[in-house]
Amino acid sequence: MKVGYSRKVMELFMYPKNAGKLEDANVTALTGSVACGDMIKLYLKIDPEKEIIEDISFESYGCAANIATSSMITEMVKGKSIEEARKIVFQEVVDNLGGLPKIKFHCAVLAVAGLRIALEKWEYIQGRRGLDKDFIRTLLKGILDPHTDKDLISAGVIEKLIIKEGEVEIHLSVPRDEFLEEIISNIMEVFETLPINAKIFIGGEQIAL
């Protein structure tokens, strides 16, 4: 054990499984943790008829625990049904890793949150849930605001959301500084694989994407 990590955590940190972009993914999820600024992106290939997660991979922007928990969640859900994957809780991820320091539990929480966002997106893609503000807030809550170290919803930078059929207008209250491009890029990324036209406005002006 090193710095409180189990042998399994160190193994997956050094040699992560299912790392990298999955080119034929039909749903993705991007989410971040306000606890430490870590972010993960999950790529899932789901069989639409059998509702089975045929393949899954991840990209991680964070610490050893972030990489290990992301890798573990992919191992735990590959080959599982949507319903089986939905039942996974963060403690199962921790247990499968042989434990985590409590200060790193948020990494397991983040991995499970990313999975649940992906499954929520899948429900929308399959027409089993509607386009509403709760759904959009769930997506935006996974994006961190570099100015406040909070998520976009908690930071209060979403002035308003206007939802039309197949379209969402996101009105932001953020400065036009060096972080703007990152915020916009992350917003567009959470809408990946969704049949939704997302438009971003600042000060009433639409931002060219």
Image (tube, helix red, strand yellow):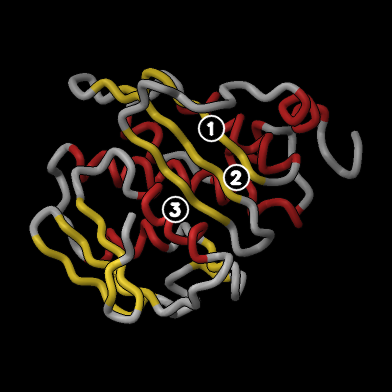
Q: Who's the residue at 44% across and 80% down the image?
A: 156
- Element marked by disc 1: strand
Q: How far apart are marks 3 and 2 (CA)?
A: 32 Å
Q: Mark 3 points at which residue?
A: 185
- Identity, as a three-letter code, of the amino acid under mark 3: Ser
Vertical side of 208 occupied by 40: above or below: above
Vertical side of 3 occupied by 151: above or below: below
- The x, y position of residue 47, in whole percent, is 26, 20
- The x, y position of residue 192, in whole percent, is 33, 42
Q: Name the residue under label 1.
A: 58
| Nearer the camera: disc 3 or disc 2 | 3
Q: Mark 2 points at which residue?
A: 91
Left-right relation of 183 to 96: left
Q: Who's the residue at 74% across and 45% down the image?
A: 63
Left-right relation of 153 to 166: right
- Identity, as a three-letter code, of the amino acid under mark 1: Phe
- The x, y position of residue 126, in whole percent, is 16, 37
Left-right relation of 64 to 107: right
- Element marked by disc 2: helix
Q: Distance between the residues labelled 2 and 1?
A: 20 Å
- Identity, as a three-letter code, of the amino acid under mark 2: Gln
Are the residues tagged 3 and 1 within 8 Å (C-beta)?
Answer: no
Q: Who's the residue at 72% across and 51% down the image?
A: 104
- The x, y position of residue 145, in whole percent, is 54, 68
Left-right relation of 25 to 155: left
